[in-house]
Image (tube, coloured by chain):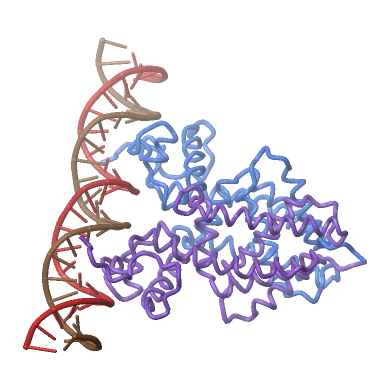
Chain colours: A blue, B purple, C red, D brown
DNA sequence: ATCCTTCCCTAACAAGTGTTTGGTAGGTTA
DNA sequence: TAACCTACCAAACACTTGTTAGGGAAGGAT
């Protein structure tokens, strides 16, 4: 029996500053490989190769392959919602809220690109599994925040009333997050620049005004 | 040896009207499962279950699991390009070309929803494999068609000149195709309605004009 | 009645999968 | 020096994977 487990295994909710340095390195490479090839197509041997150790050694740090995925996604979502909640609590108008949410989203893509890519690819079939129940929660909060902002904007006559709000929501949501598939940190554009251009397009359109 | 193979196996480029009825049924269910769970996570036993036969029996109709994927994707892309080429050859202006391409895209999503979903999910790591070289071809033609239309529009002063055309291209492209992940045939909106709303948003923006 | 074709099943194969177990080099602490 | 902890390796485990080989039932053609 594992009577006196040192600690490393099993996720830590409270941040332990002194401890799992190596753990984060391994999670980072795992996330990179998951994002590049997909969770199912990624073998733990491949992760181990990339990290410079053997497959079995990963199980000193993690319970299972799935728990790596779990930790990658939940860490990302925790940080995402910290940013979103700050925006939503600051009492901005609908247009400013939309702008702030979009900008925050591109910043998260910048910081958690692999996690976002994994989320996009895998969340659809992970939702439903009890272990990943927080994904469904997050989806609900997400929809509430975005749809609410859009509807508020329509009510206050800053957003057009002749569009299906639900369709608009989907377009806005998807285009923002799908950027994670081509975005590369350190590329030609900063997250803020991308957000600015994206907002300009979504708010004012790409056609020339008459 | 398989001296006298009846025909069924191996893809048919020229449409044989008398033959592979069952083949198309099986491909349709395979596409559905691939789209729902991802290619790698889908076992041939799962496809067989869904189709009502045993795993080995699939190999009477197909060479391999990969050849099913190949046929699903190439069939879809063939039909997509038939539609696109018609649009591109009809000598429309940039704005009308954009509208026609977007509308045609949503029609393709309506007809080939599983194939589109699979394409979105898997094409990134299939590109490069020699067997799927046509995916890279398609990507190049795709970029050429869309980027060309956008640039022509900027030159003719119908699209804004102050946006990064490449960014605009990515946004337009992604938002159109990602719709396959939530679109359900027979839903509240027809493909043409979705295209109209989407175009209205992209061309004129969601903000109220001053 | 015989043959042939179509379409499927049964049963197995080899390779690859996530995971476990026991061991061990090297540093830290007692 | 002895005991201990950390982080890894070596080797195997049980299971799932895509795929194949051989056979057989049904039905139309001869």
Query: Which x, y percent locates residue A192?
Result: 76, 46
Considering only vertical position in the picture, is A188 above or below A141?
Answer: above
Q: Residue A89, position in %: x, y?
A: 74, 56
Report the label total.
0
B122 vs C27, left or right, is right
x and y percentages locating residue A40 in the rendered image: 42, 53
Q: Give the image quarter of residue A90.
A: bottom right
Up/down of A94 relative to A51, above or below? below
Q: Residue at x 45, y 46 (%)?
A: A68
Q: Position of residue B132 (x, y in %)?
A: 48, 54
Q: Nearer the viewer, residue A79 or A194?
A: A194
The quadrant holding residue A142 is bottom right
* Foreground residue among A115 and A81: A115
- Residue at 76% over, 68% down: B91
The residue that appears at 46% across and 37% down in the rendered structure is A26
Residue toward you, A62 or A99: A99
A161 lies left or right of B131 = right
Image quarter hosting the N terminus of chain A: top left
Q: Is residue A74 above or below residue B67?
A: above
**Residue B142 position by quadrant:** bottom right
Q: Quadrant of the C terminus of chain A?
A: bottom right
- At 76% across and 52% down in the image, what residue appears? B165
In the shown orientation, is residue B188 left or right of residue A54? Answer: right
């Amino acid at each position: 029996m594992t009577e006196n487990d040192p600690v490393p295994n099993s996720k830590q909710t409270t941040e332990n500053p002194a401890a799992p340095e190596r753990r984060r390195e391994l999670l980072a490479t795992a996330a990179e490989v998951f994002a590049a090839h997909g969770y199912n197509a990624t073998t733990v041997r491949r992760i181990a190769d990339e990290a410079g150790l053997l497959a079995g050694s990963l199980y000193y740090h993690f319970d299972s392959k799935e728990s790596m995925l779990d930790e990658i996604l939940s860490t990302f979502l925790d940080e995402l919602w910290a940013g979103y909640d700050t925006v939503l609590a600051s009492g901005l108008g609908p247009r400013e809220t939309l702008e702030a949410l979009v900008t925050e989203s591109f910043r998260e893509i910048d910081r958690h690109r692999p996690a976002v890519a994994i989320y996009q690819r895998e969340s659809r079939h992970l939702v439903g599994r009890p272990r990943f129940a927080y994904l469904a929660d997050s989806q609900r909060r997400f929809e509430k925040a975005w749809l609410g902002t859009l509807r508020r904007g329509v009510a206050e006559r800053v957003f057009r009333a002749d569009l299906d709000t639900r369709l608009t929501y989907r377009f806005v949501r998807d285009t923002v997050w799908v950027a994670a598939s081509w975005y590369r940190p350190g590329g030609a554009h900063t997250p803020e620049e991308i957000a600015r251009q994206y907002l300009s397009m979504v708010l004012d359109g790409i056609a020339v005004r008459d």
